[in-house]
Image (cartoon, coloured by chain):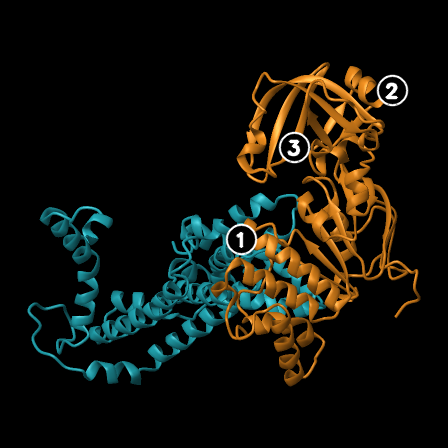
Amino acid sequence: MPSDRHGPRAGWGLKAATAGGVLFLHLPLLIIVLYAFSIEERSFAFPIPGFTTQWFGVAWEREDVRRALWLSVKVGAISMLVALVLGTLAAAAVWRSRFFGREAISLLLILPIALPGIITGISLRSAIGLLDIPFSTWTLVIGHATFCIVVVYNNVLARFRRTSRALIEASMDLGADGFQTLRHVILPSIATALLAGGMLAFALSFDEVIVTTFTAGQQATLPIWMLSELIRPRQRPVTNVVAVFVICVTFIPIIAAFWLTRDAQDTAGALK
Amino acid sequence: MTAAGVPAVAFEGVTRRFGDVLAVDDVSFSIADGEFFSMLGPSGSGKTTCLRLVAGFEQPGSGHIRIHGVNVEGVPPYRRDVNTVFQDYALFPHMTVGGNIEYGLMIRKVPAAERRRRAEEMLALVKLDGLYARKPGQLSGGQRQRVALARALINQPRVLLLDEPLGALDLKLREAMQAELKAIQRQVGITFVYVTHDQGEALSMSDRLAVFNRGRIEQIGSPAEVYDHPATPFVAGFVGQTNLLEGYLAQRLGGFPATYAVRPERIRIVAPDADVPSGFASIDGKVASVTYLGANSRVEVDADGGMLAVVEQNVDGGASVAGRVPGAVVRLVVDRRHIQAVSASR
């Protein structure tokens, strides 16, 4: 009997508690989605006065929305690339060689994400200010890369640890030099870990607010734009439309990453 | 081909340290071209390190290694004309069986059609026809072992290094693979350097074998030489079973107060009043225990001066051991030629 293998069936109390927990987590998301279709522009009136899809068109037409969206995509993509390169190199070093401070590397890499964002943000701002770097897209990228690296690092290191070192020796033994071994053996072995790590990194960067606030210049990423819209509402449902869009964009990579690494139990610590 | 007489592999005073551990301690030996050469020893005896030194994964701290006469100092693994069959096979999990076997040819940019043809040939050689498109994860241990062998042999190396290749297989499969490996070696005519801790494997397959202990070679010779004339007590105990005679027993059977080794199957049990043939040594004792092992039985005899193990063939089935009951008085006789003086281990 299946219930024998999976333990006793849950009682109604446990089921109700589970349902309550799921509702508590996801009801607010539903409200956001719902009011993206409201005809009322000023407030969250209940019940909804009427339904319309006009705000999707309005949102698409607005220049500030497009600019914020494009900046978020750009910063997310570049931070992801930086994280992929640096995170993978750090993981490879920790996996392959022994050196002084090896044990400390994991802790140091995890700090930017483990510390409160406000600390990471303010220290980055001070450092950028001290170095006299003008605030720009690139300071944003630096800020986001600091916490994206650890995501890639954790994923790739977990994969490396399940990969036999003898594979590298076998490749060299069969005539492949270092570069050929990287291309034909190492990269294919860690490909899905790179994909998963990269997508998580992008998702993290895409919805980051605190570090972004401290490292952005005059520009606004999508989350920053939304925050300012909440404070000074203008066409309130447009914000909800953008929120719906962000929910979708964030969900795709997280589900994909989950699916790609579902047989791997040890990619923990990838998300905050 | 190189001129006859140039060894396939030669070690000249090779030493390799790992920290404080002397893994290989001033080792010199040579392996002839086309030979099946085994390096036998317990774990940590330096045999695997010697293999890795030939492959190029380790560099000697001092001394020289020559492969077909060429000093390979500083030559990386990918420029050495040797290939390795790894202990855990080290097949590339993301590639098919065919992709694994063709890897070396792909790196050397051999055209795809020829790669495929040669891979199919190799699959036939190791009796894996039809498994070209499988993934290593879908194969059994024995099949993976064969893929690893094919992947190394397809490059036609001049020396094939095998690192305990049968260690992970069960007994029946291991015995079948021993015979097959030996047959493949005769067929391809490549020098095989075979690392194992299994003395039975080394005895049954090798042309010659080297017995390693604590980073040094205790003895090199043909299986019969090493078995019949162990040079040291270590070799006598590690290769096959042995009775080490010391003190009174040594004096009595060997004639001198030295150390001797006698194989249990070379001792015969006779009636207590039987005559001792000329050229034989004898000693009286009482049967202490009898262990029935099917093909043979092991009889422990409490002789004057110590215990002696005797192995008797059960040529008469269970009746063979009928007279061997604990407490029975017996006489042991052994041909003096089989009482082998062994020097102390270095």
Q: Which residue in the structure is indicated by mark 2?
A: B256
Q: Choose between A12 and B153: the one closer to the eye.
A: B153
Q: Choose between A162 and A130: the one closer to the eye.
A: A162
Name the mark on residue A161: 1
Name the residue located 64 percent from the left edge and 33 percent from the top edge.
B312
The Cα atoms of the two marked residues, 2 and 1, are separated by 59 Å
In terms of sequence position, does the residue under pointer 3 or pointer 2 come before the other?
2
Amino acid beneath label 3: Val
Considering only vertical position in the picture, is A104 above or below B52?
above
> Which image quadrant is residue B297 in?
top right
Where does residue A230 sit, x and y in percent of width and height? 25, 66
Q: Which residue in the structure is indicated by mark 3?
A: B311
Name the residue located 58 percent from the left edge and 74 percent from the top edge.
B98
Where does residue A271 sit, x and y in percent of width and height? 39, 56
Name the mark on residue A94: none
Q: Is residue A136 shown to the viewer in this render?
A: no
Where does residue B244 sit, x and y in percent of width and height? 75, 26
- Colour of the chain lettered A: cyan
Residue B209 horizontal side relative to residue A100, left or right: right
Q: Secondary structure at mark 3?
A: strand
Residue A98 horizontal side relative to residue B131, left or right: right
Residue B314 horizontal side relative to residue A217, left or right: right
Q: Chain of mark 3?
A: B
Q: Chain of mark 2?
A: B
Chain for colour orange: B
